[in-house]
Amino acid sequence: MSSFISLLRNVFLAKIPFYFFTVVLAFTLVIIYFISPLSKAAATTTMVETTQNAGCLSSMNILRLKDFELVKPILLADIDHESSDLEETKASLLDIIHQQEQYGNISTASIYLRKFSDGSWLVINGEEEYQPGSLMKVPILITYLKQLETSPGLLDKKILFTGHAPQMPLQNFVEDTLIPGNKYTIRNLLERMIINSDNDAVTLLNADLNVATLKKLFSDLNLPEPEAGDKQYPVRVKDYAKFFRILFNGSYLNHNLSEYGLNLLTEAKFKKGLSSAIPEGVKVAHKFGESGITGGEVQLHEGGVFYLNNNPYLLVVMTKGKDFAKMNQCLSTISDYVYKKFAGVTVNL
């Protein structure tokens, strides 16, 4: 300011030509004019970005482990609403369900779909409850792997098989059954339980299961605690999807055990449902479940992670109906649509 006053004094004392003063003044005013709006724009941009970030954070549901005093590891993180990017996909899946109902293949169905690349998700008939059947073998697997973190030799422990337990239902989809009188390691029983969906294997595993660890798994996921071997435990698609999500994220077990669990699931021999529509070479870590009595209402479900290039996704489908073969067709039709949609293949409904 004192420099500017000195400049004025020199002008009026004729030490500096007036025209030179005029040029300097005009140049100064131009700089002030352009700098001022830019400063305001920069401030506005900062405020907008801060607001957007705050809005994004407020729309997330985050589930954390509570085992430690200071560390609170993230188990699951969810955008609290379905993605608008999947609206077309959801509309098409609703059409497929309605078609399958009209064909008499199912009486009802529920779907949970999630893209791991960006966390977008959708759910259809999300409040419908189902009997999980063999789907419960996945949380049993996770429970044993959790026990393994503190008991390194657990997988080598052997258990004697005396014969089929009469309380366990006969299976429609099973192969390579256990032989009475033989002893099997827990490792082998876990493989048979997941790969072959063997009910005799799960009977032996349930007898040696740490029930407290199983209940804690459900509690950690904000799910009602079941009893070991509970075949009537009600489950919804979005809730069941949590088991596959924590395996994929490696957020509940250490990474090596999560990898081991998912690798077992990729070897599942059931190929009549979701995986039947998937080309060879695309890995699918999946598990099916069945319940009900033939001649009455039966239920068939399947969920899995589909490793489609760099865009893996999770699909869980639960159905009720009268005929397992027709319900299998429903699972296959839904899976075929989702795979082609995400793979960029033209889909004709």
Image: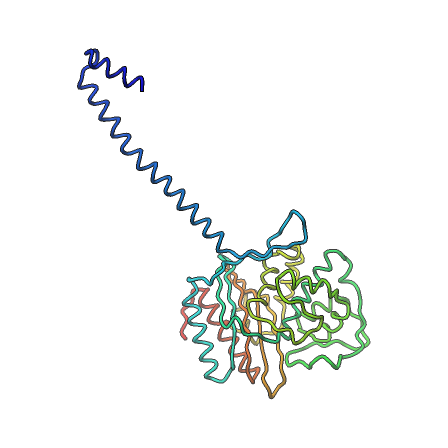
Q: Is residue 299 above or below residue 216?
A: below
Q: Is residue 53 above or below residue 175?
A: above
Q: Position of residue 116 (x, y in %)?
A: 52, 59
Going by the picture, which residue comes out furthest to the bottom? Answer: 295
- Horizontally, residue 4 falls left or right of residue 194, namely left
Q: Position of residue 344 (x, y in %)?
A: 43, 64
> Split into 4 quadrants, where in the image is the C terminus?
bottom left
Q: Nearer the viewer, residue 50 or 85?
A: 50
- Horizontally, residue 184 falls left or right of residue 34, namely right
Please give the name of the residue rendered at 20% of the width and 11% of the height, measured from the top-left corner: 13
How is the model colour-coded?
Answer: rainbow
> Split into 4 quadrants, where in the image is the N terminus?
top left
- Horizontally, residue 13 falls left or right of residue 258, namely left
Q: Is residue 66 above or below residue 18?
A: below
Q: Position of residue 210 (x, y in %)?
A: 75, 64
Q: Nearer the viewer, residue 319 or 5?
A: 5
Numbered-mark total? 0
- Horizontally, residue 169 falls left or right of residue 242, namely right
Please give the name of the residue rendered at 23% of the width and 24% of the height, measured from the top-left corner: 25
Q: Position of residue 7 (x, y in %)?
A: 26, 16
**Picture quarter containing residue 255?**
bottom right
Please give the name of the residue rendered at 68% of the width and 77% of the height, measured from the top-left corner: 175
Q: Is residue 138 above or below residue 70?
A: below
